[in-house]
Amino acid sequence: MIYRTVGIIGAGPSGIAAGVQLTRYGIATVVFEEKAVGGLLRNANWVENYPGFPNGIKGIELAYRMEEQLRGIGVELLAQGVRRVEWDGKLFRVFTSELEVMCEVLIVACGTRPRQLSERQVHPSARRRIFYEVVDLNQPRHTKIAIIGAGDAAFDYALNLAAENQVEIFNRTDIRRCLPLLWERAKNNPAIRYMPQTEVLWVEAEGEKGLRLTLSRRGDIETRSVDALLVAIGREPRLDCLDPALCRQLEALETSGRCYRIGDVKNGIFRQTAIAVGDGLRAAMQIYHTVMEGCL
């Protein structure tokens, strides 16, 4: 069993910022991250609103820089996923597949998970060929990729992939929910085809790697053969590792300064790197003042 003052679940921008600041304060902190450091920032094609980068920066490059700072300052990072978190009335008990960590303060920075297509839309043989994060596509080249969605993520993914692939964006309505500049860039990119009033009814495997899509397009039924399908239809908070009893006490624990939800896990549509970093810094500073006042 390991004891730390603060446990942070997730090494996205908010978790990184909190971990760096707490380590600067000399507070014993451990960060849990099952996947790559950087969270959804790794999906971003081009980040243009993060201060200090007047010409913008690729999301994955910014994630690498944050990871370098995290490791450089000596933040304890455990490359393990959190399976369950419990509250025993005095301490949080964080369980991974390999160990148990006790901590006095918990920072929940585990972000969001993508909403998935329903079972009635996907043949079981095709489910493993559908992607919900652009980084999982592993930098495809010379392929035909379909994207479902009409928000910032869908258009950002399309612009990311269109450099070396042909991309089709399917929007089941006429309403686009992306930034105007993303729409303008996608509209002017010959490798991207935007298709409104197009709903994906059925997805099935085709050949060894491809997919066959059945679409309803403006009331007509069509089929499409693609090499990959990327789904960007929204996200929801990732809180499944929290014990139900803990979830029922979450609000009270937050009020007392024992638990903090930061970053995308609580920010809804306001999923921005700068906001997440600010959340992390604020939580770390609040914890520091709580420690200094002897309230833990």
Image: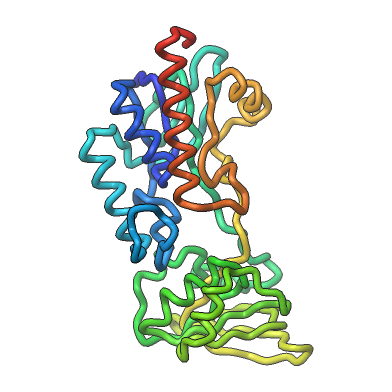
Q: Quadrant of the N terminus?
A: top left
Residue 287, above or below 142: above
Residue at 42 percent of width and 82 percent of height: 162
176 on left or right of 84: right
Residue 252, above or below 123: above
User: Residue 206 location, x and y as percent?
Assistant: 52, 85
Single out the residue that lies furthest toward the left: 72
63 on left or right of 208: left
Q: Which of the pair 66/124 is nearer the observer?
A: 66
User: Residue 222 location, x and y as percent?
Assistant: 68, 92
Residue at 37 percent of width and 40 percent of height: 16
Residue 34, above or below 115: above
Q: Which of the pair 282/123 is nearer the observer?
A: 282
User: Residue 174 location, x and y as percent?
Assistant: 72, 79
Q: Quadrant of the rendered structure where residue 15 is?
A: top left
Residue at 64 percent of width and 66 percent of height: 117
Q: Quadrant of the rendered structure where residue 138 is?
A: bottom left
Residue at 68 percent of width and 27 percent of height: 248
30 on left or right of 283: left
Q: How is the image coloured?
A: rainbow
User: Residue 269 location, x and y as percent?
Assistant: 62, 53
Single out the residue that lies furthest toward the right: 219
Q: Quadrant of the rendered structure where residue 102 is?
A: top left
| Total number of numbered discs in the rendering | 0
